[in-house]
Image: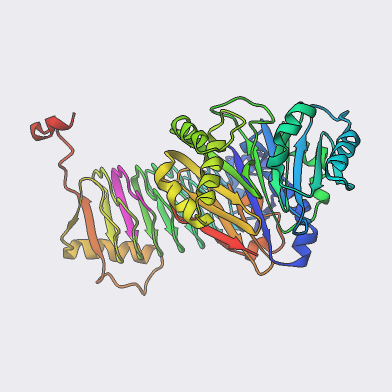
Amino acid sequence: MCGIVGLFSKSPEIESNLGKYLSQMLIEMSERGPDSSGVAIYRTPTDKSHFKITLIAPDEAYDWSKLADDLSKIFAQPVDYEVRANQATYVIPQREEKLRDWFFENHPSLKLLSSGKSIEIYKSLGLPSRVIENFNIHELTGTHALGHSRMATESAVTVQHSHPFSTGEDLCLVHNGSLSNHNRLRRKLIKKGIVFHTDNDSEVAAGYITSRLIDGDDLDEALAAAVYDLDGFYTFAVGTKDGFAVMRDPIACKPAVIAETDSWVAMASEYRALAVLPEAENADCWEPVPSKIYSWKH
Amino acid sequence: MAEFDLDQINIRELNSSLHASDVAAMESNWKIVNTKGRHAIAVGIDAKINITIDGHVGYYCAGMNKQATITINGHCGPGIAENMMSGEVRVTGNASQYAGATAHGGLLVIEGNASSRCGISMKGIDIVVKGNVGHMSAFMAQKGRLVVCGDAGEALGDSLYEARIYVRGKVSSLGADCIEKPMKSKHKAELRELLDNANLLNISTDEFRRYGSARTLYHFSIDNLGAY
């Protein structure tokens, strides 16, 4: 199974309550995926010369101020950071990829969850309520967000195997379904330089889209190509810096429903996750048709 | 009219109340509010009662219905009226996947569109859809009638048995062994009755086409040996 939700704000009211609404939506999807859950939220974008990274430590005792000091020395300027439970977000004046080797040597227990201008990813094992409470997701504001509750079917239940998967700047993917050609595709993508952290099928889908975007596709083109190159069942929701997109496979067994009002657009595996949103009863509400890409941008 | 508020009681309490042996004697008109996409609302009813459901519903609403007339004022999730035996289920909005799946009898009316696999493996139910139906509708349909006043998606009636399909609009493609058949006066009369039962009195039978099984998959054919 698995449950996915996405919320895209079209009004200041939704933006200032984005975390609260997304949390309520994700909790409705608890029964669809009790193994682990995660949220990607796009908020407080950095200025032109800075980038944001989200890191996860093995536990809450991690010395984040030491990391901040280390980074401040490297960049010869103070580094802003924000800690939430065992995760922290740092704003740094260069791309994360130049720091990868340094992280590996100096802070080997940290794992990178996301990097970009505005994306932040939070993940925990267990029910959606746990990720929401651990990281105070309900208090976050932002422009758009995706959430996932996982019922694991093809790879281990760990935080690393939890959705959303991010394999490129400001890009993330949540998936309900299973892919059958992910091993071969992963090998091809590794040769092209895409880095994977797990043996999970959904991470390959995220890596595939990243690879297409690097090659010059826009998100719609990348998803259109995915219909041919990904074999399996899927409803995807893909987040980018400006918005998100939804696509179902040509058979469309995995459920999805989209609703829209003047103040928001939202998608979920089931309508009950949308019912928590203001004016949901009167929203335009439809089921996305197979292989069609639905996308919204700010 | 008696009312159930799903913000006050849970689904099990609702369905148990509607399963009471004297439910019809107690009250013939029931209303359910605050549905909020919840699953399995009004499932397994076996009583001659009217149930009005205000709001969108989740999976398997009105499943296994016998005798009851159930109206959903809203959209419904997957599996509406699945395995219905008799009675009537009406959805004023759209229906998700496999509406009326495997149902043996009764009438299912969808006033909006139905999604994929509408009437999959239907076994005697009549389904009338005012809008369109999605791909693989009436897949392996055995008995009953599917009326589509709009368009039908890909692979309509794939591996069809003896169910009859009437479509007014465009058919994207026919599934294996499904063919168009002549629309004779007896079929027009049958269609008229179905449309009237669905309260679609203003829709003429003239533009409908009839589809059914070519019955070539019923028996082993030596010509197909190469395919095995």
Q: Is residue A16 left or right of residue A154?
A: right
Range of residues picked out in magenta = B135-147
Report the front residue among A274 and A264: A264
Q: Nearer the viewer, residue B148 or A236?
A: A236
Q: Give percent across and percent down for residue B10.
A: 69, 42
Q: Position of residue B19 (x, y in %)?
A: 58, 41
Q: Quadrant of the C terminus of chain A?
A: bottom right
Q: Residue furthest top?
A: A156
Instruction: Relative to B219, say whether B147 is above or below.
Output: below
Q: Between residue B12 and residue A294, name the one nearer to us.
A: A294
Q: Is residue B142 magenta?
A: yes
Q: Position of residue A19 (x, y in %)?
A: 77, 51
Point out the image quarter for the N terminus of chain A. top right
Residue at image point 83% right, 50% down: A139
Question: Residue B202 magenta-drawn?
Answer: no
Q: Quadrant of residue A26?
A: top right
Task: Tally the numbered discs.
Answer: 0
| Whole-percent x, y for residue B217 in the image | 18, 39
The reply to whether residue B98 is visible in this rendering is no
As drawn, the residue found furthest toward the bottom would be: B202
Report which quarter residue A81 is drawn in.
top right
